[in-house]
Image (tube, rainbow, N blue to C red):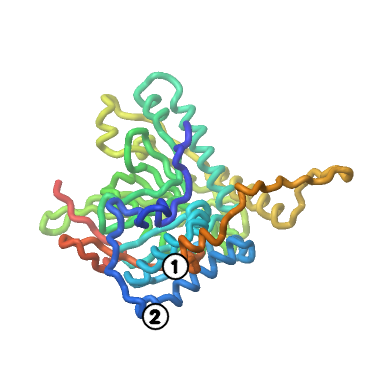
Amino acid sequence: MSELSCSRPVSLVYNPKTLLKSSCTNGLPTPPSTSREDDKAESIHIRTIVQAFKQHRSGKLSVDDTPKWKRFTLSPNEYEQLERVLQSDESLWGYVHDKVRSDYFPSTQRFVIRMKSYLHEDFIHSVTNDIGRQLERLGEGQSPSARFARSIRRGTSTIEALDPEYGPHTPDCFFKVQRTQIPGVVLEISYSQKRKDLPILADEYILGSNENVRVVIGLDLEYKGKEAALSIWRPVVEVDANGKKFLKVEQVVTNQAFRDTEGHVVDSGGLNIPLTDFANSATLAQYQQPLVGEIRIAAFDLYTYLNEAEQEYLGLQQQRFTIAPMAAELQKRKRSESPGEEIDTSEDEARHPHKHVELSDSSFETTTIPSDNGIPSTRVLRSRARKTMSL
């Protein structure tokens, strides 16, 4: 199984040389233009966000010492101001694009900035590698199930919502079948700041994709203790008393522990993902025979992957790993800049006279919903929304 070439964190903008856009399917509508008085009144939040990113970019704010799931609430005018700020600083935009993953919740007017952590990255790497190895084994042979397993790819790029009432999200990892737009399986690492938003995030993935996302898996790493648990969400169809059908999200596994508060393994059922979870119904219908096979990761394996990630992270923090010393007689010769390679800061400042504001490492919350008349409006929905179905 190969990885998607686009597996990278994605911020709310794509190209600093073009008009900034949200990663929504049709692009977030540009809010009404604001006056300079509005900018002055609303710039405090923006400056706070900018300062946090400046500190992080300069190394003064450690990723591992700061919350990984930061929320901000911004008005539509403030969001537009944030777009102008990012557009004015290509260097900052590049930093955010490379280092930050993001989530946008139209239902709650929330934009979340995710900061990567070595511990979480190491753990999810082990889990997804295990899934990948099992998919390779399932892909051996020429059966329909084997051909299907070989078509599955892994990635971490932004998932675009098909429904404009839901926002784009950049998961910790996903698995999708070739020639499909939406992944079937989404994995999220949860922790203290993110835990309460995970059910809403599952709604966003499943309802926003019109149930093309078939399963959302949450692996909760408890920071206040050593407990770690598994949760799973799936789409279900609910019929009310009038026979009307609704698509909703149901948590089918709730906080199933694989490590207890004392740090011991819990002999639970582990993680089981049927092969059919990796694709939508339209893709599965292309196979003449039912697909068989399942991904199984035992609770002990999840426990082991987490312990190994923690040990690696602790070793890095304590700087106890081996580093080869440079020979004492060696001297470093730095690469000299030629005149043509020098940066003309005066020319850069001339092109960007207002290049002083930047995006931060916090999470902010803002949501603009497109309307039929082209004028954006804000909207707050119920967190556990149901979706009417015409079946």
- Residue drawn where x is 34% and y is 29% of the image: 291
Name above or below for residue 288 compared with residue 119. above
Camera-side mark, 2 or 1? 2
Q: Residue furthest left?
A: 242
Looking at the rendered structure, the secondary structure element under dot 1 is strand
Give the camera-side residue of 7 and 19: 19
- Residue drawn where x is 55% and y is 44% of the image: 125
Give the camera-side residue of 111 and 278: 111
Give residue 221's position: percent from left, percent from top: 54, 57
Question: Which residue corresponds to mark 1?
Answer: 71
- Residue 41, disc: 2
Residue 64 shows up from this direction:
yes
User: Which amino acid type is marked by label 1?
Assistant: Arg
For residue 309, side relative to residue 352 (left or right)? right
Give the camera-side residue of 54 and 180: 54
Q: Which residue lies furthest to the front in this view?
A: 339
Give the camera-side residue of 286 and 359: 359
Looking at the rendered structure, the secondary structure element under dot 2 is helix
- Residue drawn where x is 44% and y is 62% of the image: 88
- Return the disc, 2 or 1, that comes first in the chain's sequence: 2
Q: Which residue lies furthest to the right in this view?
A: 329
Give residue 346's position: percent from left, percent from top: 54, 62
For residue 218, side relative to residue 108 (left or right)? right
Q: Quadrant of residue 24?
A: bottom left
